[in-house]
């Protein structure tokens, strides 16, 4: 199964994928196997900037690691 997290360039919605709060919160959640939350400014390629609250909760399904992630403005 493929995920944007697998792409070293990230999701492509931001020019800051390596420091993206959404990406890093999801990865930390999966790695630590606990829910992670973060509040941060998110900047998109379009130039739009949003303050977001990210909540990522890990789970396993058929041996694969996943995250349920909620992003609120």
Image: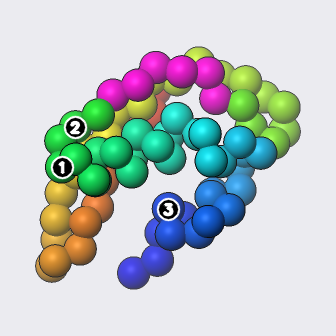
Residue stretch in magenta: 37-42
Q: Return the x and y of residue 57 as percentages of the image width and height.
A: 24, 44
Decide if residue 73 is in sight here: no
Q: Report the side of 3 relative to 68 (left or right).
A: right
Q: Return the x and y of residue 34 as percentages of the image width and height.
A: 18, 41
Q: Return the x and y of residue 32 as percentages of the image width and height.
A: 22, 47
Marker disc for residue 33:
1
Instruction: Name the secondary structure under disc 1.
Output: loop
| Camera-side residue of 44 and 21 | 21
Label 1 and label 3: CA atoms lie apart by 16 Å
Q: How many marks?
A: 3
| Mark 3 lies on residue | 5
Q: Report the side of 60 relative to 8 (left or right).
A: left
Q: Main secondary structure of the magenta part?
A: strand
Label 2 and label 3: CA atoms lie apart by 17 Å
Residue at 59% from the left image edge and 40% from the top image edge: 20
Asked if 1 appears above or below 34 in the picture, the reply is below
Asked if 17 appears above or below 39 in the picture, the reply is below
Asked if 9 appears above or below 57 in the picture, the reply is below
Marker disc for residue 12:
none
| Camera-side residue of 8 and 67 | 8
| Mark 2 lies on residue | 35
Q: Report the side of 71 relative to 48 (left or right).
A: left
| Quadrant of the snapshot with the N terminus | bottom left
Instruction: Name the secondary structure under disc 2.
Output: loop
């Amino acid at each position: 199964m493929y995920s944007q997290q697998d792409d070293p360039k990230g999701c492509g919605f931001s020019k800051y994928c390596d420091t993206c709060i959404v990406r890093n919160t999801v990865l930390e959640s999966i790695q630590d196997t606990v829910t992670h939350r973060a509040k941060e400014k998110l900047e998109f390629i379009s130039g739009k900037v949003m303050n977001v609250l990210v909540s990522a909760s890990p789970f396993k399904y058929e041996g694969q690691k996943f995250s349920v992630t909620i992003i609120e403005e």
